[in-house]
Image (tube, rainbow, N blue to C red):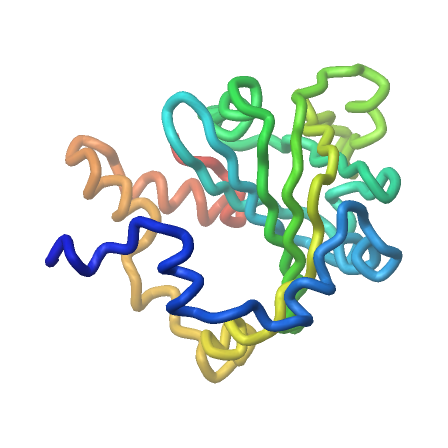
Amino acid sequence: MNDQSKITEADTLRDLYGEPVPASLVKEMTFLTDAYAAFIKASPFVVLSTSGEEGLDASPRGGPPGFVRVVDKNTLILPDRSGNNRVDSLSNVVADPRIAMLFLVPGVGETMRVNGRARVSIDPDLLQSFVDPNGKIPRSALVITIDRAYVHCSQSLSRSKLWDPAAQIDRKALPSIGQMLQACRAEFDGAAYDKRNEDAGGLIPED
C-alpha cells in the first residue's frame, strides 16, 4: 500500500466525508432516555468492547431480554455469567475502565451504542440479585456509568440481511467449533469437544 494514501490528520478525514448528518448529532445523549432504556431492556445480546494492557477486546454477551440491568438513566449492570475463565474483558476493565457496548434486538434493524466507564463488583447482595433460574450466582458484575448513549440506524443490519431467514446458512457449511480449536492445536480432540458441546446444548465454553 502506498503510504501517500494514508490519512494522518483529522481535518483531512473531515474534508473527505463532509459534515455529519444532523440526526447523527441529535441522537447522542449523556444519559439514557426512556426510549433508549426500553431498547436495552428488550435486548438479549450485547457486544462488550474493552481496552487494557494486552490490547483491545470485543466480547459477545447474552441472556434473557433485560439481562443487562438498567438501574437508572446513568447506570447499567452486566452480570458475568459462567464462561471460559479467560477474563479478558474483566482484566481490561481493571486496567482501563473505559468500555463500549453495542446492543442488538432480534428482528430490529437499529442498534444501541453505549460508551462509558465500568468497575468490577463482587458485592454479595448485588450478585445475589442476579441469581439465574438454576440457582447460579455470577462471580462478578460490571457496574457501568454511562458517558454517551445513542441509537444507530438500520443500514448495517439491512445491508447484512442479518435477520433475513433467506440469508441464513446451514451451520454445517462452516467448520465446527471443535474443528476450529483443533486447527489451532493439532493435539486437541475436536470431535470429542463437539460431542460434549452437542450434549450440553451448545453451552460449554472452550476448554
Say which quadrant the C terminus sits in.
Answer: top left
| Whole-percent x, y for residue 192 in the image | 32, 40
Please report the residue visible at 44 percent of the width from the left and 44 percent of the height from the top: 197
> How many numbered discs?
0
Decide if residue 108 is on the left or right side of residue 190.
right
Please report the residue visible at 23 percent of the width from the left and 55 percent of the height from the top: 6
| Whole-percent x, y for residue 11 in the image | 41, 56
- Of 74 and 64, the residue lying toward us: 74
Please report the residue visible at 73 percent of the width from the left and 25 percent of the height from the top: 137
Decide if residue 131 is on the left or right side of residue 72.
left
- Of 125 and 18, the residue lying toward us: 18
Say which quadrant the N terminus sits in.
Answer: bottom left
| Whole-percent x, y for residue 144 in the image | 71, 33
Asked where in the image residue 33 lies, by quadrant, the reply is: bottom right
Above or below, 22 relative to 52: below
Above or below, 177 relative to 82: below
- Of 54 and 162, the residue lying toward us: 54
| Whole-percent x, y for residue 183 in the image | 19, 43
Please report the residue visible at 79 percent of the width from the left and 31 percent of the height from the top: 131
